[in-house]
Amino acid sequence: MDNISAITTFFGWCTVVNLGIYAITALALTLFRNIIKDLHSKLMGVPTDKLDELYFNYLGKFKLAIITLSITPYIALKVMGS
């Protein structure tokens, strides 16, 4: 039972860290959109009008990964530990 508790704690902290990174990324893309778009356009050679779609796609996939790889195992382990 102690092992499940340790793994549950691990996935709980993974969830907190991942959601923090997601929030910072979403906030940065919202507040500093023009600066970030110019930087990414120059670095990657992607037209600036295409970047909004790419950012939206990135945030959607990141959120899905957080739900699948962090939140779902955490909930399952919490249920198992009860």
Image (cartoon, rainbow, N blue to C red):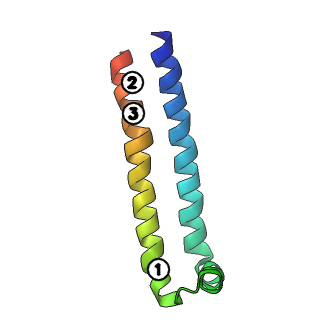
Identify the residue position indicated by label 1 in the image.
52
The kind of residue on which mark 3 rests is Pro
The kind of residue on which mark 1 rests is Asp
Q: Earlier in the sequence, mark 1 or mark 2?
A: 1
Identify the residue position indicated by label 2 in the image.
78
Calculate the distance from the C-alpha at mark 1 to the C-alpha at mark 3.
Answer: 31 Å
Question: Viewed as shown, does residue 15 lie left or right of 33?
Answer: left
Calculate the distance from the C-alpha at mark 3 to the C-alpha at mark 2.
Answer: 8 Å
Q: Position of residue 22 (x, y in %)?
A: 53, 56
Estimate how packed mark 1 is, as few (under 14), some (14 to 19) or many (20 or more) residues with alpha carbons within 10 Å: some
Calculate the distance from the C-alpha at mark 1 to the C-alpha at mark 2.
Answer: 37 Å
Q: Secondary structure at mark 3?
A: helix
The residue under the point 34% across, 28% down is 76
Q: Nearer the viewer, mark 3 or mark 2?
A: 3
Question: Viewed as shown, does residue 49 lie left or right of 73?
Answer: right
Residue extending farthest to the top is 1
Q: Secondary structure at mark 1?
A: helix
The label number, if any, that marks residue 73 in the structure image: 3
The kind of residue on which mark 2 rests is Lys
